[in-house]
Amino acid sequence: MLLTYIPQSFRIEMLKTRNTAAFWLTVASAAFAPVLLCIGYLAKPQNFFMPAKAAISAWDLFAGRCWQINIALFLPFFIVLINSMVVNIEHRSNTWKYVFTQPFPKASVWLGKLLLIQALILLNFILFNLLILVAGFILSFINEKYGFGNQGPDLMMWLKATTKAYLATLAISGIHYWLATRIKNLIVPIGMALMGLVLATVLLQQKWEYIDWFPYAYTILSARLQPEGLLQKHEWISIGYFVVLNLIGYLDISRRNMG
């Protein structure tokens, strides 16, 4: 029964967000690092020319630089903002009570928003990787000395990195989706994310033994560590956080008076 309502709830949430900044935030966040690096390559090309027999391919080097910018500056904040912006539609128009009086199960409302948020996050990752490819092909066309023609991109490595990064974001997404239903102000979650990232950096530098349980460190951990196998311990924990926090968040919102 619930499954029959979820697609319609998802479409409703898409219609609600089409006139908001959520979609453009998704595109801008994905485009920033590839566009910035492409401009940097064009501005000072001599600094980025690759020797013919370099140990690393020009594609992997360019993609790695884009990932470093994205992980360090944008990804955690994008996750926080996209959760807040999708949920804030109901806060801003004061329509929570109206939403929950519609002939839909409350769970389908929660899942509709959740699926839209995850779809936007996945779209961000897809656009990010596509724009890295586009930027690389543009640079290769402009000057072959950049080295993009010497060796093709390792798409399987990119897929693995994207999968790991996405799983690492689930914990933060679970935290801030629940918080967004309780907090109307966008500044509070951004402040929490900033403090979380600063603390994560300090804890990583101190090699804290329980870092696998600190969600704001997960994107950095997934970008830095590459052990055997697909998933690391913190990525499994991230999935667990996501499931548990969404269950708690749904129980919380379904029992509250949202009027």
Image: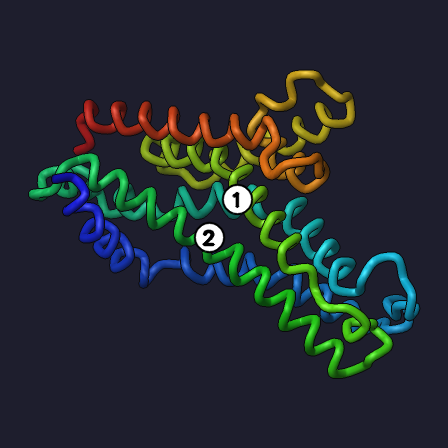
Helix, strand or loop at label 1? It is helix
Vertical placement of residue 221 versus 17, above or below: above
**Label 2 – label 1 distance at C-alpha:** 8 Å
151, 38: nearer the viewer:
151
Out of 174 and 257, give the one closest to the viewer: 174
Q: Which residue is mark 1?
A: 166
Residue 195 in sight: no
**Along the line of sight, the residue nearer the viewer: 179 or 65:** 65
Q: Residue furthest front?
A: 229
Residue 122 bears which disc, if any? 2
- Label 2–label 1 contact, CB within 8 A: yes
Q: Could you tell whether 113 is left or right of 139 in the image? A: left
The structure residue drawn at horizontal position 63% and vertical position 55%, both measured from the top left corner, is 156
Image: 82 above or below 211? below
Outermost residue to the top = 209
Q: Is residue 207 left or right of residue 6?
A: right
* Residue displayed at 70% across by 64% down: 153
Residue 133 location, x and y as percent? 64, 68
The residue depicted at 70 percent of the width and 16 percent of the height is 209
Which amino acid type is shown beneath numbered disc 1? Tyr
Which callout, 2 or 1, points at the residue further toward the start of the chain?
2
Q: Quadrant of residue 36?
A: bottom right
> Residue at left 31%, top 26%?
247
Which element carries disc 2, helix, strand or loop?
helix
Determine the image quadrant of residue 219.
top right
Specify the amino acid type for callout 2.
Answer: Leu
Specify the quadrant of the image occupied by residue 215. top right
Residue 105 in view of the camera: yes
Residue 109: horizontal and vertical position, in percent? 21, 41
Where is residue 37 shown, x and y percent of the image? 73, 64
